[in-house]
């Protein structure tokens, strides 16, 4: 591979460096170009067309106008943003608290706890949707337990009430992904020098103070990383709502997300591939914007 | 044998690697079919295949079973890709979606007007498979509806089977209240996120979301208005146990939680699977709306077989559908007896199985009754946007139940639908 | 003095009680659905539907029913083949690229890298149809290779390895260069062994995603002989009258391999994560 070396050619060092650089990233670049960039460009071109199935006509900005006038789109956008604003912070904070609780050398059974809490994210979409639907049915185990504990006296219509359906979706995502994020924090926490924490403890800083003023700032890069991946995941939210609501995003479109709407426009409704492609670029713009904001927010405080 | 040159070895290794990853190619004479219910249309297609193979030993069948939503999704993706090799030879399509596929993917399905004798089939089925004078596919099962009820619960509440014959929905609600008062059981179960009930009631009133020209017919649609009103009344009367999806819906009546259910005939097999409830069930006609032109018969679902135009085995596939689904009366008897499938071949209805009485349903001639109701189902134009309208209806049903006037709700539905059906 | 110590001890004990309480609750909630799945597999469908929480005696019947409806060895083999081969190639291609992006930095390559990262934001649904058309015209529909191809260069894994490479000691590379090792030799004989726990963590993540993948295999696969376990369980669960006992057996079977991989590689997985977030 490294045929060009610094010794035998003029300016060879840079060349050697470059050739190796391209050789290492080459295979991945070729694959990405074929299986990711090319389809992306194709679907971008689709977004200036509109029509039924294969009967497509050029429409220019027609799809953007349609988006503007489409109440379902706005509903889906509002839902998606609601899920994002409520779910991501809850999950991140939970994951941080759990990771912090686990990161104690004196803790017994820590491996057991860690494994158990990580477990949900290995479950498959199919298994998980079957289980959650049966657990959260009107006379399911969750309602019966809550009534038994005296938390409430009427069963909650988890899947038929617009408000509780949203709560259920948020619960489900949080259940599945908190452990996954927790592992990142735990790994980062174990990298942190314990002596600083120890010193603060001896100085009488209470544990919550150490958590907020020492641990969290040191975890900032990881928090940023997990926040961005969770943002991408939540804004593209599909699996959970698709499987919990049988693909409908009900009740009353209360759990319809942008990705599910795209799916419906492509597969359930009269297929309009152009319009669906246009909406998918709304997600791209949103994610890019939010990621940028998150980066910016973290940078400023440094 | 000489030693093979390195290049050949590499090629061989690559070939072995590739064939490890690739599935075996289809060989000639194999008909691939997509359908969705292992206990129903999949099993029925297996039976059909076996029958055909007896006369045509060279033909084999590859019947592939996916979830229904998955079949639709794969079909739509395959049609959009424009290549034939991504699609099966025969696919099962639910009747509501038939026109959508025929109109938005012209040329994708094989026209069969001259190859199949459609005069033997129920006219409403043939009508929804016809576009611009050409008929595509072969009709399969009917979704004629009935009122399935628990004899024991109704008896306990003081009602005889005769009390349920040809009733209105208002009467049904009254009976429901009495049943709950006496037995503590809810009268029925419904998934309010599903448009099924709306469609049943609306079609029994002879209307659909669209008029015969395919134009939106919502605000002035008395049958749709009646359908929404009825559902709101049922929920307000407290006779509905809300279901959270298909499984929860099925669980409602199979577990004995509710006293009755109004749905398609294809549910019979599911109900009869509860062997412990034998003799406790009965069937009655679908309740009707209290308005002119309303009947005690309706339809929910039902599907038909379509042959893809680019299929390599097109002729054989058409021949197969024609030979079995087009004229094999004995086959229709068997699938009715084994699977509870009410076919839409009218000639099959004179068969012996239709006359049999069923001890599970207290000795009623269940099949004969469904066959009679089938003849009364009002034909409507399903149009091409049923899914969009279903979505608009279920999205606004909650508001109606919360007390919004029905005319305002109809207006909302129309508004939402308008932006969806371009 | 003693007072302060006392109160310290009290808070410590309180804190540790709280800690155990919180962790136990979180662990219980996380594991409960799995427990529910195991219970379900031992009950008959009617009992599962009514939400019975105690084990039943129908496990063998459910297994029998599942085996009768599904060609278990074939679907497991299909899933395993896709997941193991796909994961192996994905990790090779993507780790090489992640390493390359970090070790041989240039302005152009950094630009390319940011463009690639942006593609993480494109939802899969929007490229599904063009991708499918591509596979169809290449004649790859209904092959396992079509499932694996688009996942081979995983942007997330490239990103993950690039982050991890930042922790790879530069002295090791310099020493190897002085010893006359070529770049690919440094990668293969020094980087890979040093980063093995990073590889283990990547393996767990990619294997999990690949094994659980649903949407794309669903579209690409057309025949019974090529279907994966996830597809089969999903179609069983969507019958007009699903046999839930058999479905539960199926979900267990679909979940076990990922559990096994995770348990087998747990230690390396956590260590590998450690490297990636430095």
Image (cartoon, coloured by chain):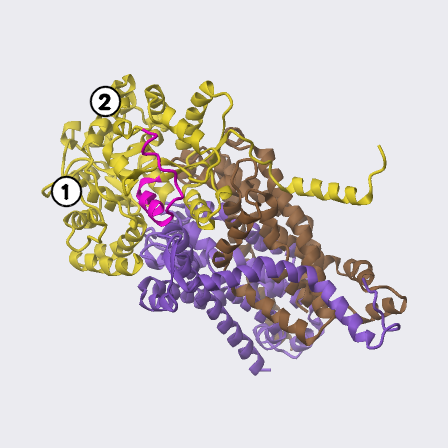
Chain colours: A purple, B yellow, C brown
Seen in the picture, residue C159 relative to A135 is either above or below; the reply is below
Q: Residue at x 33, y 42 (%)?
A: B98
Residue C186: x and y in percent read 82, 63
- Marks 1/2: CA–CA distance: 25 Å
Q: Do the residues under discs 1 and 2 have CB atoms within 8 angstroms?
A: no
Instruction: Say which element carries label 1.
Output: loop
Q: Is residue A8 magenta?
A: no
Residue B312: x and y in percent read 48, 35
Q: Is residue B245 left or right of residue A122?
A: left
Q: Is residue B89 left or right of residue B131?
A: right
- Count the marks: 2
Q: Residue at x 23, y 27 (%)?
A: B371
Q: Earlier in the sequence, mark 1 or mark 2?
A: 1
Most foreground residue, A301 or A145: A301
Most foreground residue, B336 or A176: B336
Quadrant of the image occupied by residue B90: top left
Q: Residue furthest left?
A: B292
The subunit letter for the residue under badge 1 reads B
Which residue has dot 1 on it?
B289
Q: Residue furthest front?
A: B114
Q: Residue at x 51, y 40 (%)?
A: C222
Q: Which residues are magenta?
A: B94-116
Quadrant of the image occupied by residue A225: bottom right
Which residue has dot 2 on it?
B364
Task: Give the mark toward the camera: 1 or 2.
Answer: 1
The subunit letter for the residue under badge 2 reads B
Residue C29: x and y in percent read 51, 53
Residue C17 seen in this snapshot: no
């Amino acid at each position: 591979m490294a045929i060009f070396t610094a010794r035998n050619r003029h300016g060879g060092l840079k060349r050697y460096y470059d050739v190796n650089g391209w050789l290492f990233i080459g295979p991945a670049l070729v694959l990405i170009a074929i299986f990711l960039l090319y389809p992306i460009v194709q679907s971008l071109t689709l977004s200036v067309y509109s029509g039924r199935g294969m009967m497509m006509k050029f429409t220019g900005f027609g799809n953007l106008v349609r988006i503007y006038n489409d109440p379902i789109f706005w509903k889906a956008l509002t839902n998606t943003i609601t899920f994002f604003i409520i779910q991501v912070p809850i999950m991140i904070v939970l994951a941080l608290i759990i990771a912090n609780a686990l990161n104690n050398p004196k803790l017994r059974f820590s491996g057991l706890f860690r494994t158990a809490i990580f477990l949900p994210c290995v479950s498959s979409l199919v298994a998980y949707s079957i289980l959650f639907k049966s657990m959260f049915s009107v006379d399911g185990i969750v309602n019966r337990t809550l009534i038994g504990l005296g938390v409430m006296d009427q069963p909650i219509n988890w899947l038929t009430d617009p408000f509780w359906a949203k709560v259920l979706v948020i619960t489900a995502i949080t259940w599945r992904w908190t452990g996954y994020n927790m592992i990142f924090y735990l790994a980062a926490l174990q990298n942190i020098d314990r002596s600083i924490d120890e010193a603060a403890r001896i100085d009488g800083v209470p544990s919550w103070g150490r958590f907020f003023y020492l641990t969290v700032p040191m975890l900032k890069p990881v928090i940023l990383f997990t926040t961005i991946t969770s943002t991408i995941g939540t804004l593209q939210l599909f699996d959970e709502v698709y499987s919990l609501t049988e693909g409908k995003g009900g009740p009353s479109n209360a759990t319809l997300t942008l990705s599910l709407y795209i799916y419906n426009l492509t597969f359930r409704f009269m297929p309009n591939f152009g319009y669906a492609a246009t909406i998918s670029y709304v997600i791209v713009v949103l994610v890019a914007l939010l990621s940028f904001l998150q980066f910016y927010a973290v940078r400023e405080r440094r | 044998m000489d030693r093979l040159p390195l290049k050949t070895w590499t090629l061989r290794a690559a070939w072995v690697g590739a064939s490890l990853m690739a599935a075996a190619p289809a060989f000639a004479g194999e008909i691939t079919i997509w359908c969705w219910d292992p206990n129903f249309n999949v099993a029925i297609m297996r039976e059909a295949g076996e029958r055909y193979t007896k006369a045509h030993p060279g033909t084999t069948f590859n019947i592939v079973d996916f979830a229904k939503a998955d079949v639709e999704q794969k079909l739509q993706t395959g049609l959009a890709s424009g290549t034939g090799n991504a699609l099966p030879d025969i696919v099962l399509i639910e009747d509501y979606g038939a026109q959508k596929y025929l109109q938005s993917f012209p040329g994708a399905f094989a026209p069969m007007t001259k190859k199949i004798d459609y005069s033997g089939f129920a006219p409403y089925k043939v009508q929804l498979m016809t576009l611009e004078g050409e008929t595509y596919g072969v009709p399969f099962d009917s979704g004629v509806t009935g009122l399935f009820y628990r004899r024991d619960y109704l008896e306990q509440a003081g009602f005889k089977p005769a009390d349920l014959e040809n009733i209105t929905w208002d009467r049904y609600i009254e009976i429901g209240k009495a049943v709950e008062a006496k037995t503590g059981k809810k009268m029925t179960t419904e998934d309010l996120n599903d448009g099924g009930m709306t469609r049943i009631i609306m079609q029994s009133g002879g209307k659909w979301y669209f008029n015969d020209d395919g134009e939106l017919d919502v605000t002035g649609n008395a049958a749709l208005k009646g359908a929404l009103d009825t559902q709101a009344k049922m929920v307000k009367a407290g006779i509905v146990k809300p279901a959270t999806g298909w499984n929860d819906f099925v669980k409602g009546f199979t577990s004995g939680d509710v006293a009755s259910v109004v749905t398609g005939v294809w549910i019979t097999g599911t109900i009869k699977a509860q062997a412990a409830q034998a003799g406790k069930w009965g069937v009655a006609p679908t309740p009707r709306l209290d308005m002119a032109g309303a009947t005690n018969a309706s339809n929910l679902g039902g599907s038909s077989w379509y042959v893809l135009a680019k299929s390599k085995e097109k002729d054989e596939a058409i021949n197969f559908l024609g030979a079995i689904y087009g004229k094999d009366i004995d086959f229709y008897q068997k699938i009715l007896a084994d699977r509870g499938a009410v076919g839409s071949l009218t000639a099959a209805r004179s068969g012996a199985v239709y006359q049999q009485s069923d001890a599970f349903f207290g000795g009623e001639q269940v099949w004969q009754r469904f066959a009679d109701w089938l003849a009364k189902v009002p034909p409507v134009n399903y149009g091409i946007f049923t899914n969009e309208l279903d979505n608009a209806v279920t999205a606004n049903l909650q508001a109606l139940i919360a007390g919004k006037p029905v005319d305002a709700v109809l207006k909302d539905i129309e508004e939402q639908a308008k932006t969806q059906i371009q | 003095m003693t007072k302060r110590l006392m109160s310290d001890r009290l808070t410590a004990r309180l804190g540790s009680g709280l800690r155990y309480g919180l962790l136990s609750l979180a662990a219980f909630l996380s594991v409960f659905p799995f427990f529910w799945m195991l219970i379900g597999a031992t009950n008959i469908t009617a009992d599962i539907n009514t939400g019975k929480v105690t084990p039943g005696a129908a496990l063998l019947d459910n297994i029998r029913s599942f085996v009768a409806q599904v060609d278990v060895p074939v679907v497991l083999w299909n899933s395993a083949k896709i997941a193991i081969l796909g994961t192996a190639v994905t990790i090779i291609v993507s780790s090489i690229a992640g390493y390359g992006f970090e070790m041989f930095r240039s302005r152009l390559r950094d630009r390319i890298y940011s463009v690639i990262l942006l593609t993480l934001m494109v939802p899969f649904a929007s490229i599904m149809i063009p991708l499918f058309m591509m596979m169809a015209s290449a004649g790859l529909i209904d092959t396992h290779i079509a499932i694996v191809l688009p996942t081979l260069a995983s942007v997330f894994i490239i990103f993950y390895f690039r982050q991890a490479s930042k922790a790879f000691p530069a002295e090791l590379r310099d020493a190897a260069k002085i010893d006359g090792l070529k770049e690919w030799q440094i990668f293969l004989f020094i980087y890979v062994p040093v980063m093995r726990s990073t590889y283990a963590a990547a393996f767990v993540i990619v294997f999990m995603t690949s094994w659980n993948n649903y949407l794309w295999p669903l579209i690409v696969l057309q025949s019974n002989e090529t279907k994966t376990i996830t597809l089969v369980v999903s179609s069983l669960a969507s019958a007009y009258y699903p046999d839930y006992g058999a479905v539960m057996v199926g979900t267990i079977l679909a979940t076990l391999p990922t559990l096994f991989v995770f348990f087998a590689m747990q230690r390396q997985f956590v260590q590998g994560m450690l490297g990636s977030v430095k």
